[in-house]
Image (spheres, rainbow, N blue to C red):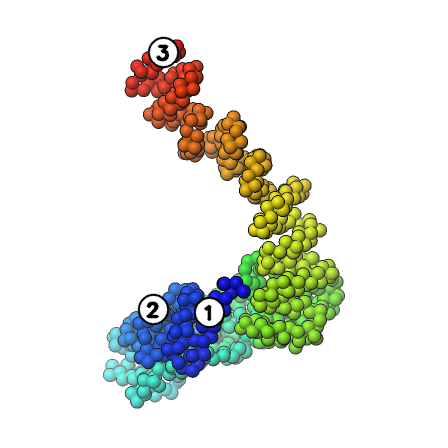
Amino acid sequence: MTDQQSQAATYEEYMNAGHAAAWDKDWERATKAYSMAIKLRPDSPASYNSLGLALLQIRPPRLEEALRVYQRAHDLDPDDPLPLEKSADVYERMGRLQDAATQYLAVAEAYLGRHDLEKAIGNWERATRVTPGLVRVHQKLALAYERIGNKRQAVREYLTLAANFQRQQRTDIAIQAVERALRLEPRNPQALNMLQALRSGGELIFADERLKKDQQPEEVEKRVGFAEEEVAEEEEETPEAYAKGPIGETVLHTLEKLAVEVSDIDMMADPGAIFLVQAIELHRVGDNKNAIEAYKQAEEMGKRSPAITMALGSLYVDVRNWKEAIQHLSQVVNNPEFESGANHGLGIAHMNTSKIQQATRHLIRTMQLVDVGLAINEDEAGELGAVYDRLLQNLSSADDATLDALNQRFFDLLTGPDWKQRVELTRHQLEDAVTQSPDNILDVATVPAAIIESMNVIDGYIRSRRFNLAMDEVYYVLAKEPEYLAAHLRMGQILIQMDQLNAAVEKYRRIADTYLSRDNKPRAREIMTEVIQVVPMNVDIRQDLIELLEEDQRWDEIADQYIDLARAYQDLGDIHNARTTLNQALQLGQRNGIEKGKILAILHYLADIELQRLDMRSALRAYTNIRNLDPTDEQARKMLVDLNFRLGDPMGAIRELDGMLQLYAQQRNGKAIVDLLREWSEKRPKDEGILTRLAAVYQQIKQPQWALDIYTKLLDIQLEHGRHSDACKTLKRILGLRPPNPQQYIDLAKQLGC
């Protein structure tokens, strides 16, 4: 085990010790354990959140420390609302109510950004509790409570709004707020009394009963969600709409989006918003026909948006009005916010109108969007997109009976609480199937539900790092389905997590061989690439991958693998094989015309290797090839100047230097010319060729004093070596610059017989 792995294990041990102490309510011990975990991993937000909780539970609570800890957790993970929420709690306990209200509002907005309206409501409530009179927040709360069907709370907020508006002498708006409350509860006595008082100009009496006088502080704290005993998180039930698959998930997102949009609208000034609120509520409770009418009325009042179109399209699917469903969903099928749900709905609609090929296309597109959305990076997303493109291409020749059966399979797959987990598993099966005939695709794709459930269990064990249990479940799956490659892949992943790399590599190699035996080279390549990422020093696997790529003539990818293989050899200290590998890559690239950029990368790497071997002439050849391929490569040109000087060929070095000067001149880069010559004049202060060129450049840029200084150095060198003829030429150049003391140069010229 490496030091890093040992440290990680110790971190986990401290975190587990802290959790155990928290369970026993030994908060001092929990604080110490979490603090040790932070020392080992100071960039982990989870440890700071756990420490903050422990500091709040200690008696007396250490509020200042807890506030600093939660602020650090927020800095590490700005997208997590929890540290902000707990900071607001701390501010409230410290009596800093304005800070607490500001923080609660920030938390509410964070939850809105996550489309979590329930939690946003909770934080708005807390903000109004610590700082009464937040009119805008009360309006948001009223609309939000209407949205989730809590009429009693919505009425309370509208009456609170009325009281606030009346205090501001805005009686007309106060009356509208009370009337809105009465639409929800026409016989509410408090609302009726307030309306009468407002119209008659009498005294308005309204008591907000959220905090009753006879309540104890502990009861109030428990009600708003700060109870000290509530340490464990409750599991949330899967919404019924989510079980409908991508269209259900999209509808949930759509309703949340519409609710947030409506919360920013002044209901009193926009009648269309009232119909939209009604539509959202009717949609939420499943009153589909009336929801459709309400949405249509909202549209007639000018409330039009892609979200409303999506909502209507989903409702038409629910009421089996396939024509309207197709018309509406087709309008948003290319909108990134709604495309997975819209494609799903279109697939269902086309299935029910016997448009089998269209249904297949939309259902496969739905699976692709879901699967790509779960990808961990752009590279994986690109690979998944290619899988589904191949699937569509191979299905184009399938008959209607096969497509009809396949549509039913996809429909079943995309329905139920675990549909998202099943998509990835099914994709691997379909990937195998696309290399065979479309007639066999159903046989390959069909997997028993029990196996899918077991795979979900395995994934859960892996996430919770219970690798032994995960491995036992894998063996259970393979006992039933020995050829099920997805289970074999899970075994490889578990072996990697358990640091059994040799066994993992062997498992992955067998899986790759299996894909090859099924003539599924793309998947075999992906498996080998995954292995290389885990064990980059495994030369054998990389060579196997290169051979596989050569069979398919994927020359650019082969060049990349050769470069990585050379690095592996270099890391192993095997410079000879690194050099040989790069030469092989170079020959392959020259034979098969790979892109110039990769050839240049190989040559640069080869030149570096040659320099490490102190083989200057081989390095010179490599850089010469680079210069010939790319005359603008400054690094290669500079190295050619240097290597020629080091190899005792000053004439060759000056030729390369002149080539660089010409390049810079073509680019009109005078500064680069001066900088290059200055650099080399410092490295070789007695080189006459460099000094002559530098002095001439100074003359051209009208710097006669600098040119005079350089010519003077050049003259001293020539006189020192007794080269009077060259000295005479230099004296002529100096006199042409009109030096301040020309007589001494004239006298010297006479002495030399110039």
1 or 2: tag closer to the N-terminus: 1
Name the residue that disc number 3 marks.
Answer: 751
Q: Which residue appears at 59% of the width and 56% of the height? A: 536
Q: Which residue appears at 43% of the width and 66% of the height? A: 40
Q: Quadrant of residue 145?
A: bottom left
Residue type beneath disc 3? Gln
In what element is the residue under mark 1? helix
> Please, is residue 235 above or below residue 512 in the view?
below
Q: CA distance from mark 2 to mark 3?
A: 84 Å
Residue 149 left/right relative to 134: right
Name the residue that disc number 2 marks.
Answer: 68
Q: CA distance from mark 3 to mark 1?
A: 85 Å
> Can I make out residue 148 in this image?
no
Name the residue that disc number 1 marks.
Answer: 11
Q: Position of residue 229 (x, y in %)?
A: 40, 83
Which quarter of the image is occupied by the C terminus?
top left
Q: Quadrant of residue 629?
A: top right
Q: Position of residue 380 (x, y in %)?
A: 58, 59
